[in-house]
């Protein structure tokens, strides 16, 4: 125990001074590169065995992170980036076989045995997970969860634990730490939860922080705050950072060095800025291409000009909706007008609680507004009126949960057809075939079940399902937010093509302005149930009228680099 | 919070009212003249020979000669004032006395069974999830399936054969001495323990895959620490909600088990009352067991927010549940 305490004091002292001299004075020789290697992966490979078959997830990756250095692992899903992080964190489970070495501060985690490795990890590695919603124990108070790493590893004096946890919460950007400490996770917002997780990751003053897509579940402005916080903390404490992301723009903004992973191997490596600004490897280039706002594939998209004078397909006037009791209602949507004409492409941008989803549900006829009028093809709609479904069809965010897992996807695609035109059974196989071809899928995939398809494939199937009744309006509610950037770009290009070919009107609901910028001709910016700003997308982006819109635009990752480059 | 309490109380009142009404309707739906049935059931054989004055007395006491609405209102009033009437099959003792005599023995059996049930169920669940080898885990799982699949009378006979007739550890019949409660309560407990074990082990598996469990592992908690400080508490939530259901099972289980083991008690009384068509006694028993079920459910519901504050939080609505 006493040696632990000494070690702890040494690390603190060294962090406070931050000078290499302090390190030498304590007998730690400086390494050849001039900085101590916090993490040193040599030839790491990870294999999973499932039903007797062996699948390789990581094949011989080597990687070092020095003190104060921040490194990003970038790649599509299935590239092995998370497996590497999980190998370091010891989360791979019993089905995985790990080979190579994972040295943390000089000790090989794979060789020292479970107990010792756990101890090293708990003290020296802080983990910021992807999903702040599910990563806090719902039954335990915030303080308890931040103190946990200190208590479990008996770090410092137990009497100081509370103060250290409160300090960590403040460091993580929660100024009212005292008040929040006694709450439970369900009483916090998504951004606050992620800050609590950051606090729990930094409370032991680890040498390395591993952040696995720490912001992909958060609103853009919150996202920026969280990434800023992680950046400041690692800089001020000299902590090394391993950031895992699918978005090269985020990697470029936030890290020194980036490794591009593909199918378990490093295919490209270099300073993060350079990888973004002048990618050489084709794979890196593809990753850059896919970033909204940078992509050439997407630049080619020119939203069509709507037919002037055509009667609106959807006409919403003064629609408002509130929830909760009469005494203290939550105004989800204040009176709002929206018209969608043939060929329109309207983007609705806003964060959670902005009312964008309520507006989408009204558009889809899933919710009826408290006041105001909704007309589809000139006819007023009432709730439960299924005729609206022939005109307006949805594509939802999570393709995995919007399909019946027990049915083939082909069955699901034809479900709207069966429901709306039950009599005409002829021609259905042909319809299925043409729908699948249209969305760029092999028609033979129709016989698969949802869990046998990738997220991108499923989202294509979801689009095919929406198109099956030949609607005139497609409402895409965060339809690409759950996808990797490369897949996202493909889906956006597909939607743009379908819009041209089928003269569809698109309504695009998202928190990601970068996406809207490329596929939408008009944009509405919403906040707290109100439309703050609306206009041509190009006008809104070049001259945003409200500070909030400016903030949203500034939060798009990768823009800092543009400013530097210009 | 207040709204939550009021809503639960309201639901409890509605369910209780339903049980009372059902117990009233049952008498009306029985084909034939209830008074005659009571006399017949009372072992006096041919109702034709029944004393007309006896029939008239029963009709008068139960209000059977009044219009239906008045009968119902009168019945409600009697139930609310706890005036249960006469148990005709029990030498015309008051129903309350008859039930009171049997209640103690059944409560004893029920409580012992419930405690055993929870202990066994938790043991099954922990064993089938946490044991180190897959072989040991599936053995435990198999035991829980047996608990659910084997009917209670078969289980009772099995236990009697082994522990009473062959080994002679416990008495086979009656309610004398502490040993006599072991086999009946074990029989009842094994049935519910299977269900509880399945629900709990499933819940443990689900919770083990949650993000916060993974985060705890990443913080360097060992397996035992993760289970003790995160998994068990969260996994026990669904178990808690089925306890009301299990109590209902214990009550209906008691009816069969008391008969098999020849124990006096509510279950035995139930069977006798039905055989003798002693309507006042049957009605009182229906309301009693219904009330017990409502009470347990209410206690579970009202104490649930103490364990999981999310259920009463407006912020959590539309979230996980």
Image (cartoon, coloured by chain):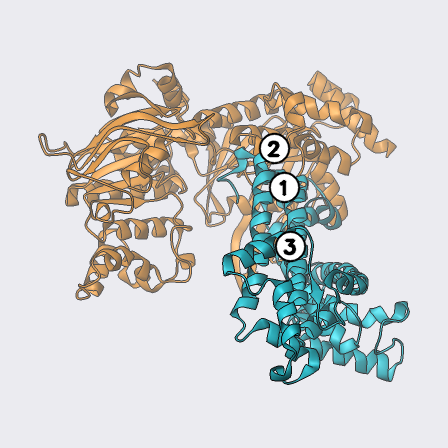
Chain colours: A orange, B cyan
Image position of B166 (left or right of A564): right
Q: Nearer the viewer, residue A379 or B23?
A: B23
Q: Is residue A486 above or below residue B162?
A: above
Task: Indicate the chain on which mark 1 is placed.
Answer: B
Q: Measure how far apart labels 1 and 2 are at the Cα level.
A: 9 Å
Q: In the image shown, does B122 or A197 lie closer to the viewer? A: B122
Q: To which chain does the residue with label 3 belong? A: B
Q: Which mark is residue A197?
A: 2
Q: Could you tell me if the residues under marks 1 and 2 are in contact, i.e. CB atoms within 8 Å? A: yes
Mark whose residue sits in front, 3 or 1: 3
State whether residue B243 appears in this view: no
Q: Do the dots labelled 1 and 2 sit on one chain?
A: no
Foreground pick, B110 / A334: B110
Q: Is residue A476 left or right of residue A89?
A: left
A390 above or below A280? below
SS at mark 1 in the image: helix
Against A17, is A410 above or below?
A: below
Which of the labelled discs sits on residue B215, or is there none?
Answer: 1
For label 2, the SS is helix
- The residue beneath circle 3 is B78
């Amino acid at each position: 125990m006493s040696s632990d305490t000494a070690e702890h004091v040494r690390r603190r002292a060294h962090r406070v001074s931050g000078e290499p001299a302090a390190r030498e004075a304590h007998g730690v020789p400086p390494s050849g590169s001039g900085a101590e290697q916090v993490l040193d992966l040599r030839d790491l490979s990870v294999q999973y065995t499932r039903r007797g078959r062996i699948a390789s997830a990581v094949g011989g990756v080597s990687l070092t992170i020095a003190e104060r250095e921040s490194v990003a692992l970038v790649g599509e899903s299935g590239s092995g980036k998370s497996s590497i992080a999980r190998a370091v964190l010891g989360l791979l489970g019993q089905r995985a076989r790990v080979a190579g070495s994972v040295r943390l501060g000089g000790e090989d985690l794979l060789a020292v045995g479970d107990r010792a490795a756990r101890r090293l990890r708990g003290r020296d590695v802080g983990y910021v997970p992807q999903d702040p919603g599910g990563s806090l124990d719902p039954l335990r108070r915030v303080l308890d969860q931040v103190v946990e790493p200190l208590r479990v590893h008996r770090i410092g004096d137990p009497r100081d634990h509370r103060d250290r946890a409160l300090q960590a919460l403040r460091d993580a950007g929660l100024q009212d730490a005292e008040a929040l400490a006694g709450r439970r996770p369900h009483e916090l917002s998504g951004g606050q939860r992620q800050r609590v997780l950051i606090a729990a990751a930094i409370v032991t003053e680890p040498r390395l922080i591993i952040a696995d897509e720490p912001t992909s579940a958060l609103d853009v402005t919150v996202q920026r705050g969280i990434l800023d916080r992680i950046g400041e903390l690692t800089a001020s404490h000299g902590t090394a950072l391993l950031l895992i992301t699918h978005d090269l723009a985020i990697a470029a903004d936030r890290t020194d060095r980036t490794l591009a992973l593909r199918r378990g191997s490093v295919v490209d490596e270099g300073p993060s800025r350079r990888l973004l600004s002048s990618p050489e490897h084709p794979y890196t280039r593809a990753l850059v291409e896919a970033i909204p706002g940078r992509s050439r594939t997407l630049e080619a998209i020119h939203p069509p000009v709507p037919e002037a004078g055509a009667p609106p397909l959807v006409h919403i006037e003064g629609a408002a909706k509130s929830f909760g009791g009469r005494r203290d209602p939550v105004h989800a949507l204040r009176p709002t007008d929206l018209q969608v004409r043939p060929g329109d492409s309207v983007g609705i941008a806003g964060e959670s609680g902005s009312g964008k989803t309520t507006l989408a549900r009204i558009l889809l006829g899933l919710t009826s507004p408290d006041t105001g009028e909704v007309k589809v093809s000139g006819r007023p709609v009432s709730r439960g009126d299924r005729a609206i479904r022939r005109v307006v069809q949805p594509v939802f965010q999570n393709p995995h949960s919007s399909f019946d897992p027990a049915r083939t996807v082909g069955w699901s695609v034809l479900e709207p057809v069966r429901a709306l035109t039950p009599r005409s059974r002829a021609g259905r196989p042909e319809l299925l075939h043409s729908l699948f071809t249209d969305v760029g899928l092999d028609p033979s995939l129709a016989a698969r079940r949802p869990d046998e398809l990738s997220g991108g494939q499923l989202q294509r199937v979801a689009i095919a399902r929406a198109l099956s009744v030949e609607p005139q309006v497609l409402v895409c509610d965060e339809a690409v937010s759950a996808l990797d950037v490369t897949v996202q770009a493909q889906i956006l290009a597909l939607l743009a093509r379908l819009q041209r070919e089928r003269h569809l009107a698109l309504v695009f609901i998202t928190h990601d302005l970068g996406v809207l910028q490329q596929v939408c001709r008009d944009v509405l910016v919403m906040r707290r149930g109100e439309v703050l700003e609306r206009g041509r997308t190009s006008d809104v982006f070049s001259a945003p009228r409200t500070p909030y819109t400016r903030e949203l635009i500034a939060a798009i990752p990768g823009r800092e680099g543009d400013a530097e480059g210009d | 919070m207040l709204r939550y309490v009021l809503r639960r109380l309201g639901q409890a009142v509605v369910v209780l009212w339903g049980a009372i009404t059902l117990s009233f309707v049952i008498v009306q739906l029985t084909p034939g003249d209830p008074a005659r049935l009571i006399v017949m059931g009372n072992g006096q054989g041919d109702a034709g020979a029944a004393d007309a004055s006896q029939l008239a007395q029963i009709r008068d006491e139960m209000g059977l000669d009044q219009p239906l609405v008045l009968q119902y209102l009168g019945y409600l009033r009697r139930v609310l004032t706890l005036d249960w009437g006469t148990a005709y099959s029990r030498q015309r003792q008051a129903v309350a006395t008859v039930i009171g005599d049997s209640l103690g023995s059944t409560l004893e059996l029920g409580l012992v069974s419930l405690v055993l049930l929870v202990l066994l169920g938790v043991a099954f669940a922990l064993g089938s999830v946490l044991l180190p080898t897959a072989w040991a885990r599936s053995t435990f799982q198999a035991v829980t399936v047996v608990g659910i699949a084997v009917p209670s009378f078969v289980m009772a006979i099995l236990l009697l054969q082994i522990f009473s007739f062959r080994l002679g550890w416990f008495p086979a019949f009656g309610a004398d001495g502490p040993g006599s409660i072991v086999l009946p309560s074990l029989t009842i407990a094994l049935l519910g323990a299977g269900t509880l074990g399945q629900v709990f082990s499933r819940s443990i598996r689900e919770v083990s895959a949650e993000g916060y469990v993974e985060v705890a592992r990443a913080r360097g908690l060992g397996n035992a620490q993760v289970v003790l400080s995160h998994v068990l508490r969260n996994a026990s939530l669904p178990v808690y909600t089925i306890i009301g259901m299990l109590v209902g099972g214990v009550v209906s289980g008691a009816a069969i088990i008391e008969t098999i083991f020849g124990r006096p008690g509510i279950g035995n009384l139930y069977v006798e009352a039905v055989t003798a068509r002693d309507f006042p006694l049957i009605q009182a028993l229906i309301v009693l067991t219904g009330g017990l079920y409502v009470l347990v459910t209410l206690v579970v519901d009202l104490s649930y927010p103490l364990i999981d504050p999310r259920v009463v939080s407006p912020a959590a609505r539309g979230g996980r549940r």
